[in-house]
Image (tube, coloured by chain):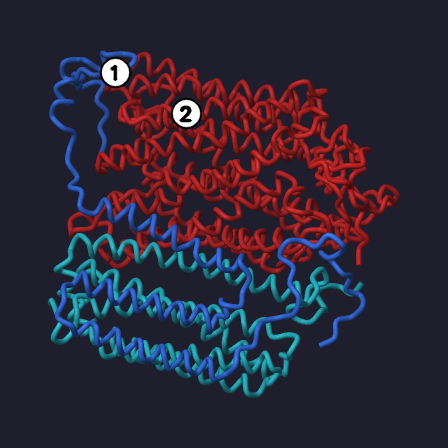
Chain colours: A red, B blue, C cyan
Amino acid sequence: MSNDTNHHTDKHSGDVNYLNFEKGFMSWWMSIDHKRIGLMYLVSMIFFFAIGGLLALVVRTELMKRGQTIIDNDTYNMAFTLHGVIMIFLFIVPGVPATLGNFLLPLMIGAKDVAFPRLNRLSYWVYVFGSFFAFLAIYFKLDTGWTFYSPYSLRNAPAVMSATMAAFVLGFASILTGVNFLVTIHKMRAPGLTWDRLPLFVWATYATALLQVIATPIIGITLLLLFLENAFGIGVFRPDVGGDPVLFQHLFWFYSHPVVYIMILPAMGIVSEIIPVFSRKPIFGYKAIVWASVGIAAISFLVWGHHMFVSGMSDFVRYLFSFLTFFVAVPTAVKVFNWVATIYKGSVEFTSPMLYAMAFVFLFMIAGTTGIHLATLATDAHYHDTYFVVAHFHYTIQGGAVIGLYAGLHFWFPKIFGRMYNEKFAKIAFCLLFIGFNGTFLPQFVLGMMGMPRRYADYSTFSNVDTFEYLHFISTCFSYINALGYSLVLVNLGYGAVKGVKATANPYNSLGLEWQTPSPPPHDNFETIPVVTDWSYGYGEEYSDHDHNGNKKVVAKPA
Amino acid sequence: MEHTTEWKRLGKGDLPTEDMDTGLGHIVPIDVYNKVFAALVVLTLATVWAATLEVSGTAHIIVAMFIALIKAALVYGCFMHLLFEKKIIWIIVTYPLFILALMILGTTGDASVKRESIPSNVEIEYKKGKGFGVNDEFLQAPDVKEDTAHSTH
Amino acid sequence: MSHHETLPAGHYHHLEPEQAYHSAKLAMWIFLATEIHLFGGAFCAFAFFRWRYFDDFNHYAGQLNWQLGALNTLVLLTSSWAMVRGVDAAQKGLNKLCGRWLIVTIILAFVFFGIKAIEYSTKLSHGIYPSTHIFWGLYYTMTGIHALHIAVGIGLIYWLYLLTKKERFSTVYYTPVEVIGLYWHLVDVIWIFLFPLLYLLGGVGAGAHH
């Protein structure tokens, strides 16, 4: 074992743990335990994921046939808008950091909690408060698309004001989490846990937290300006008084491009944790992955204009953004190479977390390569605002971030709940999900290339309406399979959490610090803070005298 | 206030973590604070005086921002004790300035662009049917038939 | 091990006092960076429109009362100085003196509010609303958000004052005072930039381009 800890944990495995040491609703709502907060976030987010998913099914059902199928055009506009708003602001942006990040970060660095547990609790309360405004936006019939472009977003003030308020408040929760995580990682690492031994999930969370604190305030001010534009007519985004809708786009995308990296970096961190465990090999290129993670956080601020290629920006700026967008693919490519190199010649076990992790790599490759088509000016002029873009971002967000989240939920499930889900059932659900997802979105690339615009309730006036209808129909059928897959996953995990077989502390023989605690961990995580002598990827190297950098392992005495 | 022996020593040991520190904050002599305050007042008056000079509007902005930067540096350095802080705090202070510069340059650079419509030669290519899509037919303007048209409001 | 809920405020069972102090400061500095980004977006919009409507902006800036603006700047600078004197007193464990300086800070903050209220009411009574022109929209927005931050600051500093009454601070524990002091100084720095940008745009008096 490369980490020296108290080993009497298994005797007390799951007896008194964070789930049962205090009981009652108030003990959860008022809890400052990062594990409970992470779990509460998870439950809330799954709820919103379900609502967002239902809205997606409504959208897909409407598009299945030409003309009106189940809802009229105005309702359709509301459906895709709310699908976007809920999925993005209430589900995937809090996403992995709020759930697995909260749960795992202190465990992975050998701390008893985050730096500011009460701030953590406040962040959850703020999230819940923000969600109320989202419901208000539904009530006021928001239909602007999740991007709130002006001048259309100036035509329904109550709805837009509610939605911007929701996003602003939710952004505040995001910032609080980011600050907390940054200070935790800087100040609370266990003895011996130097930066070059930090688990990759922690590095990913660190890069994500940097993005959260830098980028989120900018959407805050942008939406605040939009709010004030609707409330008082300050004029900044109103073309008829000299305001500029493109300025809104600039400010909006300045945040919204980095936010996609907030969504994906933690998921990549999860994949970096899972693949070595089930390949029984150290991660290939640890340093490269670290630099790629931090590098992508930095480069992500330089490419926002690629969402605006056809908005009327100057040529020079478009060349610049296109050029820089090609760069942003490089760090991810480095990571994909390293993940594949880790699996290569490893002793691979195809457990459900590993299936999800490998699916991530495959699906994100598709996402990334189609992104290149969108980065290229000439093709983007054709693809902008078509289904090609829709397919691309669903591959990145769903095929990437959501699959990554699910990989993590499966992998750390025994740690979180102290029980195991049904592995066979999980694999079946995974297959349905994988098939359903690809079947939904692959046809959409073709639709986009043929010119099918996004956000259109109806396509019957197009000359190749027959082909469109055929492809939409296929996409919709597979979307039901996709939904079925997700439902089965949630049923399986839900059942396993309550009635699953009790799990041991370290069912996968992983070297991570979080696995050196009982399953589920006690409220205080560690009885004594562990001392770290090496990184957590030393599969096959555990019994050597030297650490992965070639230095002699020193067991430091805690002072 | 004494801390009880119950609190275990954390984060220390033979392998110190990177940003260890000993002791609490720096105490600055009061007359330094007073002198800096006096300087800030003087600089404020200087800002106003500079605004009365007969120079171009751009020059006014440059001078005003320059003086404001000096005042901010004084507040940060002395009142906020930045001069006595570790490197990481300096990074946290300076990094937003790069982001701001990026944001302001990226947007203001677009401020003088006239939003023009698609140039006409592209339209001609469209009409000739020289599309670059998988299926050229969609580039022909469709005939909107009454019975398939969907009424919207 | 005592239950975390019963420890004195600011002390967590998992952080040593020194660690807690530096962590709190680090957190506040990061938060201040987020504030700079928040105001930065507004400054960005301001720069954008100033570039586009150069003469209009000069013209409307001339309608602002630069004397009141300058006075407010001095008021805020003085409050910043009072705050730093308060932090200094807390660092030396002088709770009563600290409390007095905090009261001075709060009073000056209210003076700032009063002057701002005079300005706003004058403008509104002359029919200058946020919708009158983009300049005014941005003026009200930026000074409004700033004023909100002052209000929050007053609340926080008053809370500190209540803590001094309980003799909470000492030479080894004054974290809240220093950390809230940092926040207050940032609010001051933002005004340091707001004042010339809004009030002195295009010059005043002999140098005016209005």
Tell me if mark 1 has few (under 14), some (14-19) or many (20+) residues whose alpha carbon lies within 10 angstroms of its own. some
Q: Between A161 and A527, which is closer to the camera in this rendering?
A: A527
The quarter of the image holding the C terminus of chain B is top left
Which chain hosts label 1? B
Q: Looking at the rendering, which quadrant does residue A313 occupy?
A: top left
> Residue A51: x, y in percent?
49, 37
**Above or below, comparing residue A405 to residue C1 in the picture:** above
The residue positioned 15% from the left and 70% from the top of the image is C62
Mark linked to residue A391: 2
In-image side of B120 versus A177 (left or right): left
In the rendered structure, which amino acid carries the disc numbered 1?
Answer: Phe
Task: Answer yes or no: is residue A456 visible.
Answer: no
Q: Looking at the rendering, which quadrant does residue C41 occupy?
A: bottom left
Q: Between A231 and A370, which is closer to the camera in this rendering?
A: A370
**Above or below, comparing residue A276 to residue A526 in the picture:** above
What SS does tag 2 mark? helix
The quarter of the image holding the N terminus of chain B is bottom right
What SS does tag 1 mark? loop
> Residue A405: x, y in percent?
58, 35
Q: Between A228 and B119, which is closer to the camera in this rendering?
A: B119
Q: Between A155 and B17, which is closer to the camera in this rendering?
A: B17
| Residue at image mark 1 | B132
> Residue A128: x, y in percent?
52, 52
Instruction: Kindly report the distance in space between the C-alpha atoms of the residues bearing marks 1 and 2.
Output: 19 Å
Front position among marks 1 and 2: 1
Tell me if mark 2 has few (under 14), some (14-19) or many (20+) residues whose alpha carbon lies within 10 angstroms of its own. many
In-image side of B59 versus C148 (left or right): left
> Residue A234: x, y in percent?
24, 58
Which chain hosts label 2? A
Task: Answer yes or no: is residue A483 visible.
Answer: yes
